[in-house]
Every structure is written in structure tokens, then in C-alpha cells.
Image: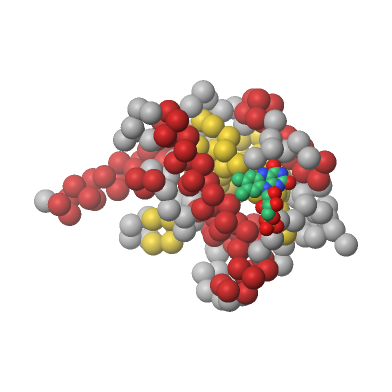
Amino acid sequence: MKHIICILICTIVLCAETISFASSTETTSLPKPKLDGGIPLYEALKKRATGRAFSTKDISDKQLSQILWAATGVNCEKSQKRTAPTAWGNNEITLYVLLKTGTYIYNPIKHNLVTISKKDNRALGGIQKFTKDAPVTIVMVADLDKISQTKDEAYKMAVSQMDAGFISQNIYLAAVSEGLITGARAYINKDKLRTALKLTKNQKIILANSLGYIKK
Ligand SMILES: Cc1cc2nc3c(=O)[nH]c(=O)nc-3n(C[C@H](O)[C@H](O)[C@H](O)COP(=O)(O)O)c2cc1C
């Protein structure tokens, strides 16, 4: 009985996630992530630092695939659990990916990008000047409606901020392994960005990480 309830809950969660990505049908598949190798964990921790001097050089699809998987990809096919923990396992954070070619949502279940706009919105990913140079900005957006265990809005925001922190640190470590720099950023013009991302009232921009090669 317990087993059946667990399967039912997993199915409902998966359906809900599929529905939330279903409004746009244009998708771009990402290369299959390589789930072994990379630099040793302690070396990545030793090298972790915030970078702000970005080269405008593009990163490869392979690198983007690795980073997104590391950020919040599915790390267990059976349970569909993720590389980053979330309070109550709600997976309330969605990654919006700002690229030169457009704005996308990362779907961790299918490991692909769902197009939401063909516009280059990278300059809206932050207020600091370097933002527009970075080839990629990953914006962490929390859907507070996915947190049903409490009605306390401040608590919902607090857990979303913590959950985004785990994702951001995963991005930092994967970026080191990929030979890239990254930096967490809370300093964002949220009003302008939320309009560009077409967010609803309860979808909150929490944090962003820009990503790219270091400017030489
Ligand atoms: C939650 C959070 C928000 C941050 N927001 C910004 C930001 O808006 N702009 C920025 O340049 N750096 C930002 N940073 C980066 C910090 O300034 C940086 O982590 C700190 O100076 C320590 O440097 P390090 O990461 O190189 O060790 C943020 C870091 C965190 C964890």
C-alpha cells in the first residue's frame, strides 16, 4: 500500500512538472550529460570563486548541458530526484536560461530547453555592467504555489532562497570543472526581468548565476 501511494505521488509530481513546461512546444535537446569524470571535488572547492570579468565567447552546448544537469538535473532515474535538495522535495525552483538566441526554461525531466522567447534578454539578468557580456545567465525562479505545506509567504520565500543557494553552489562547482567562471547575483532589476520572463504573481526571481569564459 505504502509503495502504491509513493508511485501515485511520484506520478502526480511528474505530471504537474510536465504540465508546467507544456505551454510552449518548441524545445531544444541538450547533449546527454556525462555523469562521471570532471575535476576532483576538493579541487573544485579549492578553486571556487565568484567571477565577474566575462569574455563574450560562447560556451559549448556540451558545457551548458553539464552545468544545467549539475544545477538541478535528475540524478536518480527511479525516484526522479535531483542534484540539489529542496524543502519537502517540492522542486519549486525553475531555471530560466538567458542566451544570445533567446530565453528558455530548463526541463530537468527531459533534460532539454523549452523556448519561451526568441529575444536576447541577457542584459536584464542583472544591473552590473558585466551581465550583458556573459554568454549565459541562469535565473532561479521559485513558484510559491508549489509549496503547499505552509501558508506562510515569508517561510515560502525563505526556503526558496535556501533551495536556490544549493543550485547556485552546484553551478559554481560545475563551472570550475568545465573551465568556466560564474557568479551568484541577487542584484537584479526584478520588475523588468519578470515582465520579460512572463512570470505570474507567485513566481519569484530569487537569484541568478552568469556563466562564461574568463576575459583575458
Ligand atoms: C546570495 C548571494 C548574492 C550575491 N549577489 C551578488 C550580486 O548581486 N552581485 C555580485 O557582483 N556578486 C554577488 N554575490 C557574490 C558575492 O559578492 C561573493 O560570493 C562574495 O564577495 C565572496 O566572494 P567569492 O564568491 O569569490 O568567494 C552574491 C553572492 C551570494 C551568495
- Quick check: 48 above or below 136? below
Residue lying furthest top: 201
**Could you tell me residue 50's position as x and y percent?**
71, 56
User: Is 35 left or right of 156, judged from the image as shown?
Assistant: right
Residue lying furthest right: 216
Q: Residue at x 51, y 41 (%)?
A: 161
Q: How was the colour assigned to the protein in this rendering?
A: secondary structure
> How many numbered marks have been drawn onto this rendered protein structure?
0
Q: Residue at x 56, y 58 (%)?
A: 170
**Could you tell me residue 164's position as x and y percent?**
53, 46
**Residue 109 seen from this side:** yes
Location of the C terminus by quadrant is bottom right
**Could you tell me residue 59's position as x and y percent?**
73, 58
Q: Residue at x 57, y 38 (%)?
A: 206
Nearer-the-camera pick, 57 or 174: 174
Which of the 4 image quarters holds residue 197?
top right
User: Is 19 left or right of 177, judged from the image as shown?
Assistant: left
- Quick check: 83 above or below 8? below
- Quick check: 165 above or below 120? below
Which of the 4 image quarters holds residue 16?
top left
**Residue 196 seen from this side:** no
**Could you tell me residue 178's position as x and y percent?**
67, 66
Q: Residue at x 62, y 74 (%)?
A: 43
- Quick check: 154 above or below 111? above
